[in-house]
Image (cartoon, rainbow, N blue to C red):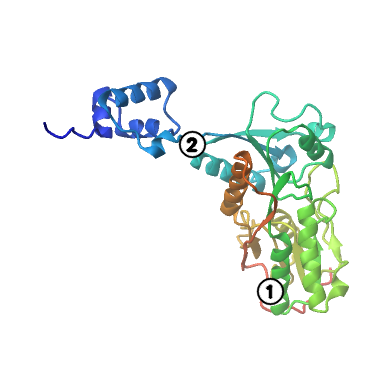
Amino acid sequence: MGQKKEVKLEDISRALGISVVTVSNALNGKKGVSDATREKIFNKASELGYEIKKEEKQKKKAYRVGVIVAERYIKEFPSFYMDVYKRVAQETTRRGSITVLEVVDEKKEECAAGGAFSDVSVDGVIVIGQLSDKYIEMLKNTCRVPLVCVDYYDVDERMDYVLTDGYGGMEEMVEMLVRAGYRSFQFVGNPLATRNIMDRYMGYCKALERNKLSDQQGKVISDRETKGYYRLDVEVPQELPEVFVCNCDKIAKILIDKLQQRGISVPDDVGVTGFDNFHPQTSAGLLLTTYENDEKRIAQASVGLLFRRIEGKKAGGIHIIEGRLIEGDTVRKGGRYKWQM
């Protein structure tokens, strides 16, 4: 008697008139195959004597990941947090799962009533950006699934935190400016508005202190309210520093436009730096000197931590994702210049 012929995927494909890719996806538990088709493929595989491999039997479970972002962060286009969400969605899809986005408006954020994802069940939640303390507390008390926060942190062990390196990145930025010869600084941002702005300000202060420039620390221009509607704006001071150190690229570009409207040249008269490397080209065609956050690694870390929590594995703590300096056109190689308006 001859040896029994080994049944291959192509045999199942040919018997059913279905592509080999679909057969493979069905047997490996991947998405994109209907339940009816999957059942038909398994039945035909059994009928033909196909030996289902161990890895095909151990079908990976697909998760539904809830993602929360405040409406105020995505009203303006482009939006850094919306880009982070897209990266999270891509990483979740790559792992064979799906995301469900919930945008929280100002009223819901302040009332913190009704919970999140009331109309759909989720296996875990990723919160992008800082929401009100009241809303975060509501999430902690009502969510029965793992929580991961991006670009926001607390000290609650029930949650994981994935952060951009605001402290270290801004410290590195100021060190670079000091090496370039700048000695007169002004920070642009409201450290009391969010914890990540506070981190950036503290990194800024540490670098100034180390370089014996602590007299510059109190020179701060606010760019937003501490609480309430998210609106970025800045008033240009009468006496300019040698360099403005902005907490984000958006406010850096607003500031550069206002300076140029008054005939002040960037970087010849005054330097300006941003942070995030998020659409860093200014309206005048300059490339911002900024700090680039690694959005891909942020998404990978966030989704990876959430899946570990969902699967009952140990996670926890604060995870800082380092970025890198981008030297653009908006600072000079030398400092020591003060412009009087």
Instruction: Measuring from the top left, give residue 20's x and y in whole percent.
Output: 30, 33
Q: Is residue 148 left or right of residue 46?
A: right
Give the number of the mark in front: 1 or 2: 2
Instruction: Measuring from the top left, give residue 101's x and y in whole percent.
Output: 64, 34
Q: Is residue 184 visible?
A: no
Quarter holding residue 25: top left
Q: Nearer the viewer, residue 34 or 101?
A: 34
- The residue sitting at 34% across, 33% down in the picture is 52
Instruction: Measuring from the top left, give residue 13's x and y in whole percent.
Output: 27, 29
Q: Nearer the viewer, residue 199 or 173?
A: 199
Q: Does the CB distance between marks 1 and 2 fall below 8 Å?
A: no
- The residue sitting at 77% across, 66% down in the picture is 203
Q: Which mark is residue 176?
A: 1
- The residue sitting at 60% across, 52% down in the picture is 295
> Reading the chain from its start, which is encountered first: label 1 or label 2?
2
Q: Nearer the viewer, residue 265 or 335?
A: 335
Q: Which residue is mark 2?
A: 60
Considering the image in quadrants, where does the N terminus appear?
top left
Q: Amino acid at mark 1?
A: Met
SS of the residue under disc 2: loop
Considering the image in quadrants, where does the C terminus appear?
bottom right
Characterize the local packing of mark 2: few (<14), some (14-19) or many (20 or more) Cα atoms within 10 angstroms: some
SS of the residue under disc 1: helix
The CA span between labels 1 and 2 is 47 Å
Q: Is residue 216 left or right of residue 120?
A: right
Residue at the extreme front: 1
Against 263, residue 105 (above or below) is: above
Instruction: Measuring from the top left, give residue 131's x and y in whole percent.
Output: 77, 42
